Image (cartoon, rainbow, N blue to C red):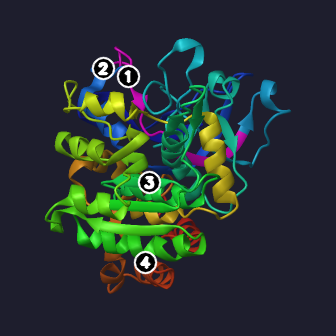
Amino acid sequence: MKTKAVRLYGKMDLRLEEFELPAIKEDEILVKVLADSLCMSSYKAAALGAEHKRVPDDVADNPIIIGHEMSGEIVELGDRWKDRYNVGEKFSLQPALNYKGSMDSPGYSYAYCGGDATYNILPPEVMIMDCLLPYKGENYYSAALSEPYSCVIGACRSLFRTSRHDHNHYMGIKQDGRMAIIGGCGPMGLAAVDYALSGEFRPKQLIVTDIDNARLGRAKRLFQSKAEKNKISLMFINTAEMKDPESEILAITGGEGFDDMLVMVPNSELLVFSEKLLGFNGCLNFFAGPTDTEFSAKVNFYNVHYLEKHIIGTSGGTVDDMKEALSLMEKDLVRPEVLVSHVGGLDAVAEATLNLPGLPGGKKLIYTNISMALTALTDLEDLGKDSPFFAELAKIVVENDGLWSTQAEKYLLENGKRI
């Protein structure tokens, strides 16, 4: 059968093409991709081409399909998997396979497996590593966003503190502790806020910083009531408007500093600032991925030693992290729609991916069987003045407090232009 896909040929060379997929083997699975969320990691792969550690050296002659935050439906099962999965079943996919120590990953390394396509062939290692995950929720966008959620879940699970009595490590967000998410109003920061308010372990105090009042205001509107319901003190702070951010934020914690911190922006000064806010036996996770291979920041090792501070970094999630994300989504305990700022079709992927660092807003959600320019949710009403299709889509979004929804997705899939 034929598939349409966005393929990488080299540095900044992405092409939307149609080509034939081979018949699946007994240990493969054919899937229909319905949604894929664009990720900055795909931009990094496009920027580096064959120099990227996950991209094959011969990508110019054997291009790969990009995209790794995908969801869809199972179409055909190889005999090996007929007792484990079902045709028609919704799925999400964990791209970090780690199969036999290989760096190969969907969206970076495979000719027939990547999220920005209409159909995929999943290689056996995806199923062997339990990375094809069934999803029982109503929509596709939540399942697609389970991958970025798994990354923040992994980051929060990796936070730790030690016992002064036996040196054991206690993992995860400190129950009823103090937590800060620095630079936390971007899409991944919002996912982290959502998880901190919803996961098994929750702080009693959560402070989120940013320097953009519009983003801070939106985040507060989205999460304040949830925090109050869960009896968590939640504050959104613009550090650019503070005379002395360090002392003023420390004062809010009663001078104790934070037990847990996530730093969501790769900025040296911000890391120095954050380390000063970390409390005794606290843990700081540098979550943001820098592109500068020499990126560094000054660390006060006097404090690391005497205040027993822990500084770590994590990148990506695991299968268990994604399973937790999917479970939270199926139970409606998290709100992945708050991450989505734009929607578009498969024909919008190449340009959007190559320009992702400069595009405003949050997550760019792609419906891979649709033809549609990348469109901000805030622009739908204006577009609706000349288009009944956009007028109805805008109405659905406005009625959902300006957020994407299952209803909006269903309307788009039923009425959008086919690719």
Q: Which residues are magenta?
A: 54-75
Q: Earlier in the sequence, mark 3 or mark 1?
A: 1
Q: Is residue 373 visible?
A: no
- How far is the residue under mark 2 from the one under mark 3? 39 Å
Q: Position of residue 248 (x, y in %)?
A: 25, 63
Q: Earlier in the sequence, mark 4 or mark 3?
A: 3
Binning the other alpha carbons within 10 Å of mark 3 as few (below 14), some (14 to 19) or many (20 upward) gives many
Residue at image mark 2: 50
Give the image quarter of residue 9: top left
Q: Any magenta on residue 70?
A: yes
Binning the other alpha carbons within 10 Å of mark 1 as few (below 14), some (14 to 19) or many (20 upward) gives many
Q: Position of residue 337 (x, y in %)?
A: 50, 65
Eye-nearest disc, 4 or 3 = 3
Binning the other alpha carbons within 10 Å of mark 2 as few (below 14), some (14 to 19) or many (20 upward) gives some
Quarter the N terminus occupies = top right
Eye-nearest disc, 3 or 1 = 3
Q: Amino acid at mark 1?
A: Val
Task: Label 1: state its secondary structure.
Answer: loop
Q: Earlier in the sequence, mark 1 or mark 4?
A: 1
Q: Residue furthest left?
A: 243
Q: Earlier in the sequence, mark 2 or mark 3?
A: 2
Residue at image mark 4: 402
Residue at image mark 1: 55
- How far is the residue under mark 2 from the one under mark 4? 40 Å
Which residue is at a point 40% across and 39% down the rendered structure image?
285
Looking at the image, do the residues carrying marks 1 and 4 touch, with CB atoms under 8 Å apart? no
Q: Amino acid at mark 2?
A: Ala
Q: Is residue 363 visible?
A: yes
Task: Label 4: state its secondary structure.
Answer: loop
Q: Position of residue 75 (x, y in %)?
A: 70, 42
